[in-house]
Amino acid sequence: MKMRTWFGLLALAFGLVAVTAGAQIVTITYWQYEFASKVQMIDELIAEFEAQNPGIKVRHETFPYAVFAEKVATSVPAGVGPHIVNLYYGWLPAWQRAGYLQPLPEDTFPTDSIESEFAPLVRAAKIDGRYWGLPTAVRTLALFYNVDLFEENGISGPPETWDELISIAQKLTTYRGGRFVRAGFGMAPDGQDHHLVREILLRQFGGAPYSDDSRTVTYNTPEGEAALKFYTDFRLVHQIGEPDFPFPGVAGYYRDGFIAGLIGMIVDGSFAIGAITRNAPHRWAVAELPRLTPDGERHNFASFWMHGLTPLAQGAELEAAVRFLQFITSEQAMKRWVAWVGELPARLSLVDNPELVADPILGPFVAALPYSHATFFVDEAAQRAVMIDAVLRVIRDGMDPAESLRRAATEEQAILDRFWQAR
């Protein structure tokens, strides 16, 4: 009897410990799309976070980019999915309206602190006076160029102007039998070049893509036509590259082409540094994007992926998700992120670091931050498609740039009208 009582007490004690231990563990789920360097970095940060917070477990789940947004759209409204999710800043207006996110708690993330500690472009994460997420990193664009090819062709350095870029690209291009063997410039309207046309060339030609209140398309102008013609002439007149070369249908074809030595120069984001560093067998370097004239205006495009809290995070899970969000947007995490992923830290205290500014690879991206523009997208995917189509209609269908731009402006204005009329 005494033995059974003893075992009973042990069982009761064990059970109490298990229940207590179980009650202490809060599991939250984090979602992002599959991007190798970011996935690996988050895995490492989760391990560090869990070691510092033994009562919290973070389940990390990833999905292909093509289905990621749809997965969130079908899961969160059904009450399943992530407590914290990584999203492109351009998706925020649509996601906020759809109820996929909840605002950051003001007591933990005061607006004044965010706006004094983070790069100004992060204000794109604020709607109706509330912040709906924060990034670990921000990105700008720059020119990647193949140093080995430059030296083999007697080219001493990167272009300062777009005309110089065309001249260099023509030296690097091999066009044989009616097709490119090597492209001097990697044209990628579905990569970063739709930003190149909209936010960089258009502004350098003296135009602006949208009204100040982001409600009206303003690129259907002579300046816009000049920008689109200038870009499409890369293929039609100067023959220094073409979309989809050299790996048609492959996501990131232009970056892979640059890595393979089949493209001499590309415009890409700082997020590409990691992949190019690990895979390119040739020497390469980075420069600020060219301008129209040596003393012309510089413009660039800036963006970021941010971490937002979904409505599924409530109670203890919300508290755990907030703590994880604080951790992955800390200076400590940003230092790790820039070293591995290559994206710039989002905190001003790190952006101004003299070592980062002087870095030969990261420096050109950092230098672009003051003159970069973060497009206010109301439907990023649809608006991106409009500009890609505008480019391809000219290159592949022979449409006049003015007519293609007029059609694009009509299509995109309809997108803006649908968004603003519903608010």
Image (spheres, rainbow, N blue to C red):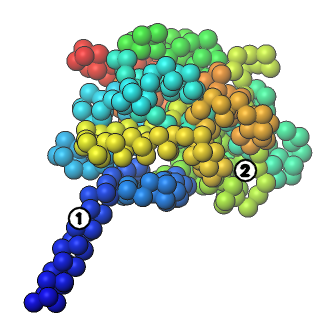
Residue at the (78%, 38%) spot, across then down: 355
Q: Quadrant of residue 362?
A: top right
Is 56 in front, or is 33?
56
Q: Is residue 203 left or right of residue 75?
A: right
Residue at image mark 2 = 174
Using a 10 Å C-alpha cutoff, classify the residue at mark 1 as few (fewer than 14 neighbours), some (14 to 19) or many (20 or more). few
Residue 23: horizontal and vertical position, in percent?
26, 58
**Which mark is drawn over residue 172?**
none
Q: Relative to 371, does residue 83 appear above or below in the rendering?
A: below
Is 360 in front, or is 115?
115
What whole-number distance in Å separates the C-alpha atoms at marks 1 and 2?
69 Å
Residue at the (24%, 33%) spot, across then down: 99
Looking at the rendered structure, the secondary structure element under dot 2 is: strand
Residue 75: horizontal and vertical position, in percent?
23, 48
Q: Relative to 347, does residue 39 appear above or below in the rendering?
A: below
Q: Earlier in the sequence, mark 1 or mark 2?
A: 1
Residue at the (52%, 56%) spot, across then down: 48
Label 1 or label 2, whichever lies nearer to me, is 1
Residue 423: horizontal and vertical position, in percent?
25, 16
**Which mark is drawn over residue 19?**
1
Looking at the rendered structure, the secondary structure element under dot 1 is: helix
